[in-house]
């Protein structure tokens, strides 16, 4: 379905499999107070301005976070899609960042692989 006005659907495609796989945390982030968008005729770029005096850069606001263990017991590998719906009121910025973290498993695993297959954005 097509998203409504001022709404974007973000789909993250990952591989799930029965061996070698790890845990992933996917977050959609909106720029913090120091974020801005630079535009020219054909594109726009999200940037973080460096704070004066060497102060730390503020952490961006998370609009959504999903954690997924890509290891499972079924003896087949499959495509798994994570769906994020982001509307304009979730962020004051014109852009979003995608943060992907590989997390330690408990108990630890010999391998902790995560395979990102697709990133798709619909709408906005």
Image (cartoon, rainbow, N blue to C red):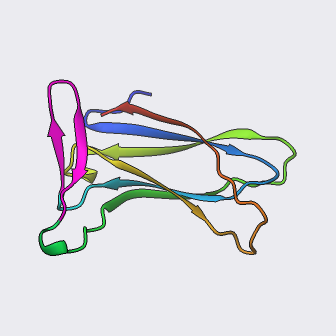
| Quadrant position of residue 24 | bottom right
* Residue that protrudes farthest toward the top in the picture: 42
x 78%, y 54%: residue: 20
x 73%, y 39%: residue: 78
Between 103 and 72, the one lying in front of the other is 103
Residue 98, position as x, y percentages in the image = 41, 49
Quadrant position of the C terminus in the picture = top left
Q: Would residue 48 be counted in the magenta stretch?
A: yes
x 21%, y 24%: residue: 42
Characterize the magenta stretch by its predominant secondary structure.
strand
Residue 53, position as x, y percentages in the image = 13, 74
Above-or-below relation of 56 to 91: below
In this figure, what is the number of numbered marks? 0
Asked if residue 95 lies left or right of residue 81, the reply is left
* Residue that protrudes farthest toward the left in the picture: 52
* Residue that protrudes farthest toward the front in the picture: 54
Between 10 and 55, the one lying in front of the other is 55
Above-or-below relation of 122 to 28: above
Residue 122, position as x, y percentages in the image = 40, 31
Asked if residue 102 lies left or right of residue 52, the reply is right
**Magenta residues, as a range?**
35-50
Between 1 and 70, the one lying in front of the other is 70
Above-or-below relation of 92 to 118: below
Quadrant position of the N terminus in the picture = top left
Asked if residue 12 lies left or right of residue 104, the reply is left
Q: Would residue 104 be counted in the magenta stretch?
A: no
| Quadrant position of residue 105 | bottom right
x 30%, y 62%: residue: 60
Residue 116, position as x, y percentages in the image = 59, 43
Asked if residue 48 lies left or right of residue 29, the reply is left
């Amino acid at each position: 379905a097509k998203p409504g006005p001022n709404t974007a659907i973000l789909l993250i495609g990952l591989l799930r499999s029965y061996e070698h796989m790890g845990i992933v945390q996917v977050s959609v982030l909106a720029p913090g107070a120091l974020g801005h968008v630079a535009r020219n005729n054909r594109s726009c770029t999200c940037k973080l301005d460096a704070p004066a005096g060497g102060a730390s850069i503020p952490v961006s606001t998370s609009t959504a976070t999903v954690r997924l263990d890509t290891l499972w017991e079924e003896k087949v590998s499959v495509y798994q899609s994570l769906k994020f719906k982001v509307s304009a009121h979730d962020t004051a910025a014109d852009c979003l960042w995608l943060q992907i973290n590989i997390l330690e498993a408990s108990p630890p695993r010999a391998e902790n692989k995560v395979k990102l297959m697709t990133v798709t954005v619909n709408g906005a």
